Image (cartoon, helix red, strand yellow):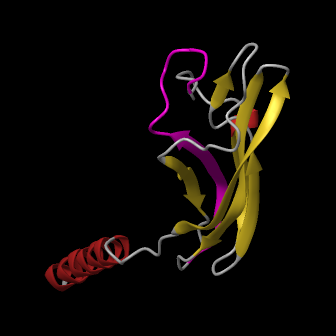
Amino acid sequence: MKFCNRIAVVSLFLLIACLCIVSSCAEKKEGKVIVTDQEFSIRQDAEYNWVINVKGKIRNVGEVDVKKVVVTGYCRSCGDILSAGIWFRSNVEKTSDQKDIISYLTAGNEEEFDFREVAFYFQPGGPGPEGKMPENLEIVIESFETVEE
């Protein structure tokens, strides 16, 4: 009789362990966020300084809600050194003005973003960029967190 009880207890523990392993291996749903619209604009920041600002929309095309979505922009063709008459980018960590954080985005929904200073232009005593955008401007979803169900 004691032998049957031991087999039953061991079988019960093995069953619980198998259920735990199977449940942890279950496919988890993921969030996915994409940029659906973007518009770059040049704004004169000071007498000899211009910056590129951006606004647009992102959409959560994933299966679950996401939070703390960080959206920022890059000018891949801009230089790293401040030089007159050439678009350049800041090579330091992005400031709060250079990114937008969407606090919560439900699955299937769209949200607007807006931030400044993707690139900079400096031209003392000469003409500005006159609407000429640099090449390779890019909006990037830096990070987001998936909301657990």
- The residue lying at 63 percent from left, 50 percent from top is 71
Where is 21 relative to 90, above or below?
A: below
Q: Nearer the viewer, residue 18 or 146?
A: 146
Question: Residue 139: where, in percent of width, then height?
Answer: 56, 52
Residue ranking furthest to the left: 3
Q: Nearer the viewer, residue 94 or 119?
A: 119
- The residue lying at 29 percent from left, 71 percent from top is 21
Where are the magenta residues, as a range? 64-86
- The residue lying at 54 percent from left, 80 percent from top is 63
Q: Is residue 104 left or right of residue 118?
A: right
- Magenta highlight on residue 42: no
Q: Is residue 85 left or right of residue 114?
A: left
Where is 146 relative to 46, above or below?
A: below
- The residue lying at 62 percent from left, 43 percent from top is 132
Tell me the quadrant of the picture where the N terminus can be found.
bottom left
> For residue 9, what is the image quadrant?
bottom left
Residue ranking furthest to the front: 126
Where is 107 relative to 141, above or below?
A: below
Question: Residue 48: where, in percent of width, then height?
Answer: 78, 19
Question: Residue 76: where, in percent of width, then height?
Answer: 45, 39
Question: Residue 20: where, in percent of width, then height?
Answer: 35, 72
Where is 69 relative to 50, above or below?
A: below
Q: Nearer the viewer, residue 106 or 133?
A: 133
Tell me the quadrant of the picture where the C terminus can be found.
bottom right
- Magenta highlight on residue 67: yes
Q: Is residue 149 left or right of residue 55?
A: left
> For residue 103, what is the image quadrant?
bottom right
Number of marks in the image?
0
Q: Nearer the viewer, residue 117 or 46?
A: 46
